[in-house]
Amino acid sequence: MNRNVIQLALAQAVMMSVNSLMVTAAAIIGSHLATNKALATLPLALYFVAVMLTTIPASLLMGVIGRKRGFLFATVIGLCGATCGAIGIYQESFLLFCLGTIATGSYTGFGNYFRFAATEVAPKEKKNTAISYVLAGGVLAAIIGPNLANLSKDVFAVTYLGIFVSVIILYSLNGINFICMRLPRPVVPDFRQTTRPMLQIAAQPAFIVAVASAAIGYSVMVLLMTATPLAMTHQHHQFSDVAFVIQWHVLGMFVPSFFTGHLINRFGVQRIIMIGAVLMVGSIAMNFHGSSVSHFWASLLTLGVGWNFMFIGGTSLLTETYSSAESARAQAFNDFTVFSAAALASFSAGALLHQWGWQLVNYAVAPLIVLVVLAHAWLWLSNKRRPVATGH
């Protein structure tokens, strides 16, 4: 892979390190700062809402100013958010902490386009591998994020302050990485090139199934991942155990990225997505068998691998449904849908866990996996009747 893909993978590693920091600690910090403990997951939910709301303007903005300038703009937003979050923790202000997570979520809204940027700088025949390699940067995040949360938690007299100081450092490093990137300049639109209305692009069976696979895979993962730290705390597990489980979850999310692209090329994207759905069912089943650290570890590890297959598979399938001139709108529509689902799942996690307990959280996600299976059966039938529509 070329230099651009490597740097995008490093950028992904830094961004996902912050994500894993947030997942490990945000709900616990929220519980510490909030008067109403039912709002414990609100900061993390707002993080995902910010990701959702940023996806469309981020894609359209980068279509005008380019990927590099867009990523640098996001760095400024992220640094402001991390600073606000640190001040919120220092002053024990739940409101400031929430504002900080909103800004860091906006940063991630831009960063989620790293995988699409990789497809723009890699040869067409290597786009699936490029997507996988960029997401493989999350392997470093699995090592950095939870360990950094655990090590930095008590660095300062104010508990958890060191976590957001770490976020400031990570964002600064990524800013330097962006400055050194040599991404292509934005392409001036060729108005002679025919583009389809967004409704026509979105009506393709392959587009619908691609978005559904990524959105459902992401929302199920977020719901269980967001609830797990609180569920473990309710079971009186140590913070170090929470960090350990999240670390292995993130490893499960990204280690398969080294070979997911090759598996898609060999076996087909739909088979890989379906395997991901089966793994998620296995993760849910494990949560019904016990609440020891080992049970949480096995469940979230399996959940991570399932997410990897469904998300990379959905992204790969999506890139077959639009032309380069249609990419900004199609990608924005996809990521808005995906992260809307993730935000809704994150909001639901705290309320479900607080009101009904860990078991109901797991019952709630099972029907969503069934929808993925039905969607792929529909696509298979559609493909038998006619070829998959493509903008290429």
Image (cartoon, rainbow, N blue to C red):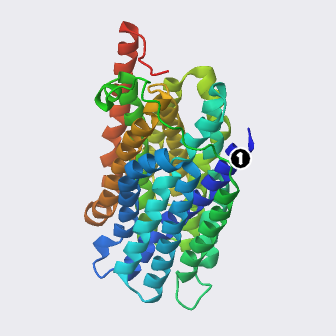
Secondary structure under the numbered disc 1 in the rendered image: helix
- Front residue of 11/305: it is 11
- Front residue of 77/182: it is 182
Identified at 40% across, 35% down, the residue is: 330
Q: Which x, y percent locates residue 141? A: 63, 58
Query: In screen coordinates, is 287 left or right of 367?
Result: right
Q: Is residue 177 visible?
A: yes
Disc 1 packing (10 Å; few <14; some 14–19; many ≥20)? some
Query: In screen coordinates, is 338 left or right of 263?
Result: left
Judging by the rendered image, the residue that carries numbered circle 1 is 6
- Front residue of 79/167: it is 79
Q: Is residue 274 visible?
A: no
In the rendered image of this protein, does residue 28 appear above or below residue 2? Answer: below
In the rendered image of this protein, does residue 274 appear above or below residue 293? Answer: above
Quarter containing the N terminus: top right
Identified at 59% across, 36% down, the residue is: 119
Residue type marked 1: Ile
Q: Which x, y percent locates residue 175? A: 62, 63
Identified at 67% across, 56% down, the residue is: 140
Kindly give the residue lying farthest to the top in the view shown.
385
In the rendered image of this protein, does residue 235 appear above or below residue 12? Answer: below
Kindly give the residue lying farthest to the left in the view shown.
355
Q: Which x, y percent locates residue 82? A: 50, 73
Q: Which x, y percent locates residue 54? A: 39, 55
